[in-house]
Image (cartoon, rainbow, N blue to C red):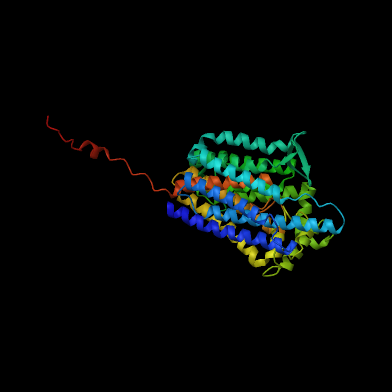
Amino acid sequence: MTATRNREAALLVAALVAVAFAWGQVQEAMTGSLGDRFWLVVAAFAALAGAAHLMVRRFAPAADPALLPAVVLLNGLGLAMIHRLDLGEAGRAEAAGLAAPQATAPSQLLWTALAVVSFALILIWIRDHRVLQRYTFTAMVAGLVLLLLPLLPVLGVTINGARIWVRALGLSFQPAELAKVLLIIFFAGYLTRQRDSLRSIRAHVLGVPVPRAKDLGPILLAWAVSMGVLIFERDLGAALLLFGVFVVMLAVATGRFSWVLIGAVLFAAGAFVAYQLFGHVRTRVDIWLDPFGDPSGSGYQVVQSLYGLANGGLLGAGWGQGSPGLVPFAKTDFIVSALGEELGLTGLMVVVLVYLVIVQRGIATGLRVRDVFGRLLATGLAFVIGFQAFVIIGGVSGLIPLTGLTTPFLSAGGSSLLANWVIVALLMRVSDAARRPPPPPPPAPEQAATQVVPVVPS
C-alpha cells in the first residue's frame, strides 16, 4: 500500500508542475512577469493537493493512485484558464476606461479548498461504502428535495432561462449538483435490492427480451422525473444526466442490454415531445443543426466557440495568446472552447484522456469490488463524470446540441466543483475496498472440531 501511495505522490508532483507551468505562462503572457502572488497561489494549490494526498494515505491507503492526480490536474488547469480570462477582462476594462470586474479565480480557489475539505470529511466519516446502502430511501428523498428547491418562490432564481439556482445570504448554489450524488446512492441501493426481480423476462418483442410490466415502473418513474425537471426547471442537462445514469446502472445491475434499448426508446420519445412543446429545446436543436443561420444572434455562442477551436488549430495559440474572452460564458459552459483555442487539439485531447483515465479507473473499481452495491455505486459515479464531459465537449464542438451541463473540475462554479470532489471521494472509498486483499476465510467446522488441545501436566 505504501508503494501505491508513493506512485500517487509522484503523479501528483507531475500534475502540480503542469499546473504551475500553466499559471506561469498565463502570467508571463498577460502581464509580462510572474507577479508577486504567483508562488503564493502555487503553494496554496500544492498544499491543498498535498492535504488530499495525506488524507488518502491515512484513510484509504489501498485506493487507486491515478484518480487524485487526474482530478488535481483538471482542477488546476481550470484555475489557470479562469485566471487567464480574469486578466483578459481586466485588460479590456482598462482599455475602455472602466473599472475591472471582480476576478473569479480567487473564489474558485476558495471553492477548491472547501471541496478538498469535503473530500477529506467523506473519507473520514465513511469508512465502508456499504454503510450508504442503509440510507437508500433517505438519499432518494433528499435528492428529490434538492431537485425541487429551485422551484420555491423565494429561494429559486432563473438565470439564462433555466430555474436551477438557489440564492440565499448573497450566495448562489445549484442544488442539482449534490442531488445527482444522492440519487446515484439511491439508484445503487434500490437496484441492489431489486436486481433479481428486474432480471425476470417473460416475453420478447421483435426478438428483444422485455421485462415484466410491473418491473417497468422504476424506469418509467425515472423518465417521468427527468421530464419534470425539463418541463418545470428547463434544465435539459440535468434531465439527460438523471435518466442516463439510471438506465446505465439498471443495465449493469441486471446484465440485460434490453434495458438500454428501452431507455433509448423512452429518451427518443421524450426528446420528440420536448422538441414539439418547448421553445428553448427547439432553439438548441436548431442552433446545433445550423449555428451559422443566425451567427450574431441565437447561434453566436456556438459560432464563436467553433472559431476559437479553429484558431487553436493543432498545437494552440498558447496560454494568453488567443481570444477566448470573445466566447460568452467562457469561464463556465464554454471553458473547453477556451482551452481548445490556447492549447489546441493536442492539448484538448490530453484533457479528454485525463477524463478517460478517471472514468476507466472508476469502472475498473466497479468491476473489481466484491459487493453489488459498490459495483453499482462506482459505475454510476464514473458514468456521471464521463457523461458530463462528453456532453459539454460535444456541445461546444457542435457534435450534439448544447445542454447546459458544467465541465467537471474545469468550469467556474462552486456547487459543481464541490459535488465532483465528493464523487471522487466516494470513488476512492470504493476503490480502497476493492484493492484491499480479501480477509482470510474462517476455519472449516470439521477442522475446528478435530483440533487437538494439548494437555498440560499438573
Residue 384 relative to residue 66: left or right: right
Question: Where does the image place residue 154, in percent across and percent down from the top left?
Answer: 77, 33
Identify the image quadrant of residue 34: bottom right
List the single residue furthest toward the bottom: 314
As drawn, 308 above or below 443: below
Identify the image quadrant of residue 153: top right
Residue nearest the observer in this picture, 341 or 221: 341
Total of numbered circles in the picture?
Answer: 0
Q: Residue at x 79, y 46 (%)?
A: 161
Residue 398 in sight from this viewpoint: no
As drawn, 191 above or below 330: above
Rendered-image quadrant of the C terminus? top left
As drawn, 292 above or below 61: below
Residue nearest the observer in this picture, 126 or 186: 126
Q: Residue at x 62, y 58 (%)?
A: 19
As drawn, 198 above or below 346: above
List the single residue furthest toward the top: 458
Question: Where does the image place residue 184, in percent across and percent down from the top left?
Answer: 58, 43
Residue nearest the observer in this picture, 286 or 166: 166
Question: Where does the image place residue 133, in percent across and percent down from the top left?
Answer: 51, 37
Question: Where does the image place residue 268, in percent across and percent down from the top left?
Answer: 67, 51
Q: Residue at x 47, y 55 (%)?
A: 6
Residue nearest the observer in this picture, 175 or 95: 95
List the single residue furthest toward the left: 457
